[in-house]
Image: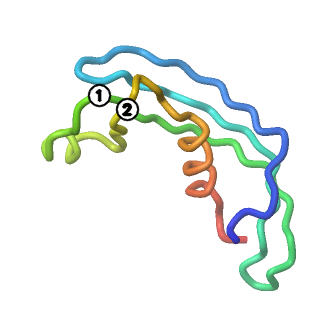
Amino acid sequence: ELLEDAKNVHVTGDFFYDEPFVTGNFTVEADVVVPSTRSLKPVKMHQKFNFTENYNEVEPTQEQLDEEDTIVTVKDDTIDLQKAVEDNLLLSLPSV
């Protein structure tokens, strides 16, 4: 409901080790279609945003959660970047 279409999605980024986390910094660009909050008619827009996530194999402590923006627990040695990109794309949408 928040996103009618997404095309030309391009993600770049880097991972680095910053004990106790592996940290990913990403830039996302996408052409999206979202419903207008006034008329509900489709509105085309270009989104470009950055996001950072920290990854760890163990559950974070409350202190770590208080200090860091995002900590994702890694399971089976796999980081799901698609979910991260989708979530952050939805979070970056302005009200139009």
Amino acid type of the residue tagged 1 in the rendering: Glu
Real-space CA distance between mark 1 and mark 2, rounded to the nearest whole angstrom: 7 Å
Secondary element type, mark 1? loop
Left/right of residue 27 with respect to residue 65 in the rendered view:
right
Secondary element type, mark 2? loop
Left/right of residue 53 with respect to residue 33 in the rendered view:
left
Left/right of residue 17 with respect to residue 92 in the rendered view:
left
Mark 1 or mark 2, whichever is nearer to me: 2
The quarter holding residue 95 reads bottom right
Q: Dot 2 surroundings within 10 Å: few (below 14), some, or many (20 or more)?
A: few
Q: Mark 1 points at which residue?
A: 57
Left/right of residue 75 with respect to residue 95 in the rendered view:
left
Q: Position of residue 3 (x, y in %)?
A: 73, 63
Quadrant containing the N terminus is bottom right
Does the CB distance between marks 1 and 2 fall below 8 Å?
A: no
The single residue placed furthest to the front in the displayed view is 76
Asked if 15 appears above or below 48 in the picture, the reply is above
The residue under the point 14% across, 47% down is: 62
The residue under the point 62% across, 42% down is: 49
Quadrant containing the C terminus is bottom right
Q: Where is residue 26 in the image (x, y as percent from the top left)?
A: 56, 30
First in sequence, mark 1 or 2: give its number.
1
Asked if 58 appears above or below 66 in the picture, the reply is above
Judging depth in this view, the residue of 13 and 86 nearest the camera is 86
The residue under the point 54% across, 42% down is: 84
Q: Where is residue 93 in the image (x, y as percent from the top left)?
A: 65, 59
Q: Mark 2 points at which residue?
A: 75
Amino acid type of the residue tagged 2 in the rendering: Lys
Asked if 89 appears above or below 4 in the picture, the reply is above
Q: Position of residue 52 (x, y in %)?
A: 46, 35
The quarter holding residue 92 reads bottom right
The quarter holding residue 17 reads top left
